[in-house]
Image (cartoon, helix red, strand yellow):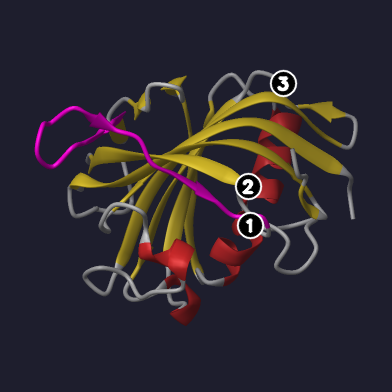
Amino acid sequence: MIDWSIQGEEMANCNCNFGCPCQFGVLPTDGTCEAVVFFRIDKGHYGEVSLNGLRTAVVYKWPGAIHEGNGEFQLIIDKAATEDQRAALGAIMSGKDTAEMATMWFIFAAMSPTQHDTIYADISVEIDAENRVAKGSVDGVVETELMPIPNIVTGEPHRVSIQLPNGFEFGMAEMAKGKSLTHDGAALDLLKNTGTHAHIATLHLTGQGRVAA
């Protein structure tokens, strides 16, 4: 197994209710799972290959709950990445060189027998975790926007966070409201998520699993 590590932030939006039923061992809100996740890698490596400063994204789609399988996904890797960096990120985010069940990338790939061709493109990622605001986009492929969950009475920003001491993705995440839209350049057509679950989280992952803060 090649030694690797990734530290950075992620922003995610799925088609479920706020909070994401998966985090509580509950089935998806409408029975299906569709999600877009953007990653900003601040520091990372795959063996001797540096991954510092790169960005990636993934579009996922399952006909039922994730653990029931039969899913599909498409990776999007920073156009600026070298051939070695592309190979490294492709391996990591496809669950390779990872202990069994150690990260969400391993699990999501294991539950997705269909992996569409990887896209190499310019990726924009802007994340403000404190204010629960974020934007991610790949021109002609996918765009996602996150904003605070509104208070149901006043409309003012409502702050909620989730802690997962044994999480395989994050230990703590800020909850948000999100919307995503896929375009013709994406292999997967999402349900045009609007006003659904979103989160922002700081990541530190290795082939052995999540590193606790």
User: Residue drawn at (13%, 42%), measured in percent from left and top?
Assistant: 152
Q: Position of residue 91 (x, y in %)?
A: 70, 49
Please tell me in which quadrant of the rendered image residue 65 appears. bottom left
What amino acid type should be assigned to the residue bearing mark 1? Answer: Gly
User: Residue drawn at (50%, 68%), measured in percent from left and top?
Assistant: 112
* Residue receiving disc 3: 52
Tell me how far mark 3 sits from mark 2, CA to CA: 22 Å
Between residues 29 and 186, which one lies in front from this camera angle?
Answer: 29
Horizontal relation, residue 169 to residue 188: left or right: right
As drawn, 208 above or below 124: below
Label 1 crowd bin: few (<14), some (14–19), many (20+), radius 10 Å: some
Horizontal relation, residue 100 to residue 170: left or right: right
As drawn, 125 above or below 84: above
Q: Nearer the viewer, mark 3 or mark 1?
A: 1
Tell me how far mark 3 sits from mark 1, CA to CA: 24 Å
Q: Nearer the viewer, mark 3 or mark 2?
A: 2
Please tell me in which quadrant of the rendered image residue 116 appears. bottom left
Tell me how far mark 2 sits from mark 1, CA to CA: 6 Å
* Residue receiving disc 1: 167
Q: Quadrant of the N terminus?
A: bottom right
Residue 181 drawn in magenta: no
Give the extent of the magenta segment: 146-165
Query: Which numbered disc covers residue 72?
Result: none
User: Residue drawn at (32%, 44%), measured in percent from left and top?
Assistant: 186
What amino acid type should be assigned to the residue bearing mark 2? Answer: Gly
Q: Quadrant of the C terminus?
A: top right
Asked if the residue at tag 1 contacts the one at tag 2, i.e. Cβ–Cβ closer than 8 Å, the answer is yes
- Dot 2: what SS? loop
* Residue receiving disc 2: 171
Q: Position of residue 5 (x, y in %)?
A: 79, 38
Mark with earlier residue (3, 1): 3
